[in-house]
Image (spheres, helix red, strand yellow):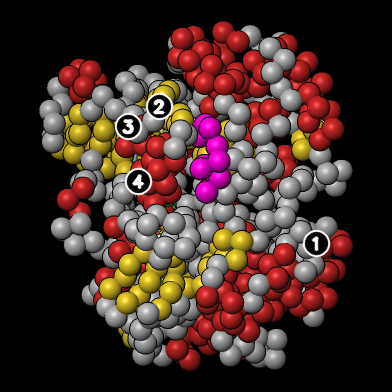
Amino acid sequence: MIRSVCGYCGVGCGIEFDKEKLIGEVTYPSNEGKLCSKGVSELISIETSSRLLRPHMRSTIEEPFVISSWEESINAIAKKIQQTPKEKIGFYLSGQLLTEDYYIANKLGKGFIGTNNVDTNSRTCMSSAVVAYKKSLGADFVPVRMNDIFKSDLLILAGANTAEAHVVFHNQIKRAKKQGLKVVVIDPRFTETAKSADLYLPLKVGSDIDFFNLISKRLIDEELYDKEFVQTHINNFELLKNKFKRVPLTKMLKRTGLSAEQFDAFFTLYKESKNIITAWTMGLNQSVQGVDKNLALINTHLLSGKIFKEGNGPLSLTGQPNAMGGREVGGLSTMLAVHLGFDKKSVELVSEFWKTDKIDNKPGLTATQMLDAKLDLLIICHTDPIYHLPNRNKVEALMKKIPMVVEINAYTNSESSKFAHIRLPAAPWGEKEGTQTNLDRTITKQEKLTRTSIECKPDWEIFMLLAHALGFKETFNYKNPQEIFEEYQEMTKLNAYMDIHKTSYESLKKQPFIWGENIKHFLTPDKKGNLFFVENKLLSEKTSLEYPFILLTGRTRDQWHSGTKTNLPATLLKYKELNFCEIHPKDAEALNIKEGDEIRISSIRGTLLSKALITESINEKNIFIPISNREINYLTNDLLDKESLEPDYNHSAVRVEIF
Ligand SMILES: Nc1nc2c(c(=O)[nH]1)N[C@H]1C(S)=C(S)[C@@H](COP(=O)(O)OP(=O)(O)OC[C@H]3O[C@@H](n4cnc5c(=O)[nH]c(N)nc54)[C@H](O)[C@@H]3O)O[C@H]1N2
Ligand SMILES: Nc1nc2c(c(=O)[nH]1)N[C@H]1C(S)=C(S)[C@@H](COP(=O)(O)OP(=O)(O)OC[C@H]3O[C@@H](n4cnc5c(=O)[nH]c(N)nc54)[C@H](O)[C@@H]3O)O[C@H]1N2
Ligand code: SF4
Ligand SMILES: [Mo]
């Protein structure tokens, strides 16, 4: 029996591999050893016929790929790097890479090639939460854990559909409910998650800032905030209080679309709850004011003092299996390494640790900026930007202009492969080993369960080969992921609060390690939490007569993003269609659309086809299309949050017609 961890979502369920079957590992996160359909099907993804098994090259994207050798492909990339100014090189990484893969790519890019253009698809996912945690708590640190729900009285889920996106955690929520936990779901859609809530609030899309400001204002006006906690531990209280004086409750409430009765019902529950956790995901992060939405939410915990105490706190639900690990390593272009930034001292510390003088002292391009920057070389690893970036027609046009696009992928059928010049075959889950950090700081070991396909290599090794071809053989001299992990552990000592060095690769084989468990205080220089006054500035795309609907996008339970990895057999896919468009009965009637009709959805940027699913679970004048429709981003707008540079995926103006 081998113990490993699921490579799909941020819950990070333990897995036991027993001969040919995968079963849930009971220790952590415990769900009586159960896995969701994705976890159970991990093994299928290794066997699928669409695996990329050899390196491929071509000189233009109009030509077919031809099989090449590792040596030839790596040398071609190395040569291109040597000929290219470093600001024209980009590394586009992924929250699905293992920590060791991330570490090497970051070290090579930022430390030795000297470009900080090393970013990740987490930019489209968690970056708003990262920025907000840093501003309010002082570090990108999740101060509460999933199993705290068993010690809590109230769980508020805002813009998070755990029933489909964090399935095993959702099952835990259901169990906690049996022990008395109350659950409120705040979502413009009556989701699968909402169905099991004690209270569902059909908030208007984009109005979360108003909602959380309403809570904060009521806490202050009714003197319900924790005075002692605020006085001792919190900055900016008077400022916030004064600013709120000028914002009328009625205006905020109106924008949320909720009635006074609905909000009061919620607030009564809120007031009566001793311990509160607020969890959120893409409904908040993916917004042109994603950071502000996060700050408005965190404000409520700072005011009520419901933080750093069992069963309390703001819990950002990270989506990808190792997005947290990637952030810890420093895989965002806006940080350098181990949560350190680009200030003089940090650059010195990291330079000394890596023994390099190449580190640039300013942030690099984000994933959402790279394509606009006219790069000469883009290395994409474990992600599919053509599929996932907003405003796809524009993204395609820009990608076509990059002279060399390298794609490192385990499968052949990504959307970005159509734009690649070189494709390198990575060893997927099950064929490699390493570590990952789940959404609540649990570091687990992923184990190799089967031999690595002959021509495939784990991602870390691919970056190491590239480093060797560039002449950095001595610095990138690792025999296995363990050696990389151990170097990374040493490096975490540069940052006082990162206690990752307390575990060991060997002990991780036996049990996970939760870092930061002793941190029960703010990580700002003055050790105080920061309140921020934020307002809903209504910056999202506006609807019009021509484009009268707001498009929401999101997950379906049994499909993982573009679906290269989840090729679930039909028996498991019975749950839901992968391509549908939820529309309200009144809107459908006005447009003469019947259930199952083929419909065309268009925005000012592009068009796609879908099938009508008429349901009251969606608000009027909103539609929902899952991202399992690979063409989703032909429709979406490319507005970004000005601080996190995360896209506003959930707010595009569209038109719906019968096809
Ligand atoms: N099955 C499956 N699970 C996954 C993934 C997958 O591809 N498939 N992907 C993983 C990843 S990377 C991520 S990031 C997570 C995402 O996890 P979630 O964010 O929970 O998943 P989404 O389906 O994107 O849900 C976002 C919810 O926000 C709502 N929403 C939209 N706009 C607003 C708004 O303005 N305010 C509020 N309050 N809500 C709004 C939407 O209706 C939707 O229900 O899932 C992870 N888990
Ligand atoms: N409209 C809209 N767009 C969105 C979102 C949304 O909610 N709405 N969500 C955004 C979010 S939160 C996310 S996280 C992104 C996700 O978007 P992507 O990251 O583009 O989605 P995936 O399909 O998970 O892509 C992972 C890629 O890695 C490859 N792969 C699998 N295993 C391995 C391996 O071991 N090594 C390597 N090198 N490659 C491997 C897979 O074949 C696949 O091509 O989408 C973003 N885009
Ligand atoms: S909940 Fe997430 S980690 Fe757990 S089995 Fe499902 S996909 Fe894997
Ligand atoms: Mo994500």
Instruction: Give the CA distance from mark 3 to mark 1.
Output: 43 Å
Give the magenta range.
147-155
At label 1, counting other C-alpha atoms closer than 10 Å, the crowd grade (few under 14, some 14-19, many 20 or more) is few
- Ligand 1 near label 4 (Cβ, under 8 Å)? yes
Q: Which marked residue is nearer to the observer: mark 1 or mark 2?
A: 2
Helix, strand or loop status at disc 1: loop
Q: Which marked residue is nearer to the observer: mark 3 or mark 4?
A: 3
Q: Is 496 situated above or below 84?
A: above
Asked if the residues shown at circle 3 and circle 4 are in contact, with their CB atoms under 8 angstroms apart, the answer is no
**Rendered image quadrant of residue 655:** top left
Say which label, 3 or 1, has the lower sequence index: 3
The residue that disc 3 covers is 195
What percent of the width, then of the height, locates residue 193? 36, 37
Can residue 63 be seen here?
A: no
Instruction: Give the CA distance from mark 4 to mark 2.
Output: 18 Å
- In this view, the residue in front, 169 or 404, is 169
- The kind of residue on which mark 3 rests is Lys
Magenta segment includes 151: yes
Say which label, 3 or 4, has the lower sequence index: 4
- The kind of residue on which mark 4 rests is Glu
- Ligand 4 near label 1 (Cβ, under 8 Å)? no
Answer left or right for 253 relative to 49: right
- In this view, the residue in front, 162 or 399, is 162
Magenta segment includes 188: no
The residue that disc 2 covers is 198
Answer left or right for 233 relative to 383: right
